[in-house]
Amino acid sequence: MSITSPASHFDPKRCPLCEQDNQCAVAAGNEPSNCWCMAVKIDQQAKNRANTGDCEKRCLCQQCGSSF
């Protein structure tokens, strides 16, 4: 996991855990139904890790959402 930089801290297209592109359809301006996350179950531990800290909420990438 990388350290969150101030520039990426507010980027909704970056995963809050690994800072890679999260492939979020909503952040890209598309319909939520087109997002990869609508077809998979996101690991609860990953959600919990993403909801800690002081950064604003951002979507997980597929790798982090299913890696636990």
Image (cartoon, rainbow, N blue to C red):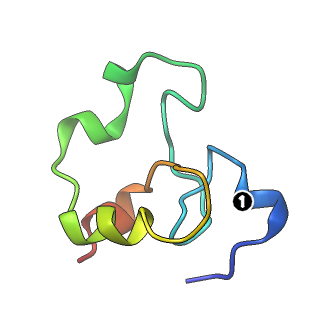
The disc labelled 1 sits on which kind of residue? Answer: His
Left or right, residue 2 beside residue 59: right
Left or right, residue 46 beside residue 29: left
In the displayed structure, would residue 10 be above or below residue 37? below
Seen as rendered, the residue at the extreme right is 7
The residue pinned by badge 1 equals: 9
Q: Residue at x 23, y 77 (%)?
A: 68
In the displayed structure, would residue 49 be above or below residue 31? below
How many numbered markers are drawn?
1
Estimate the x, y position of residue 64 in percent, counting from the top left.
38, 67
Q: Residue at x 25, y 34 (%)?
A: 38
Seen as rendered, the residue at the extreme top is 31
Q: Residue at x 52, y 51 (%)?
A: 22
Estimate the x, y position of residue 15 in percent, counting from the top left.
54, 59
Q: Quadrant of residue 21?
A: bottom right
Left or right, residue 41 beside residue 14: left
Q: Residue at x 44, y 56 (%)?
A: 61
Q: Quadrant of residue 1?
A: bottom right
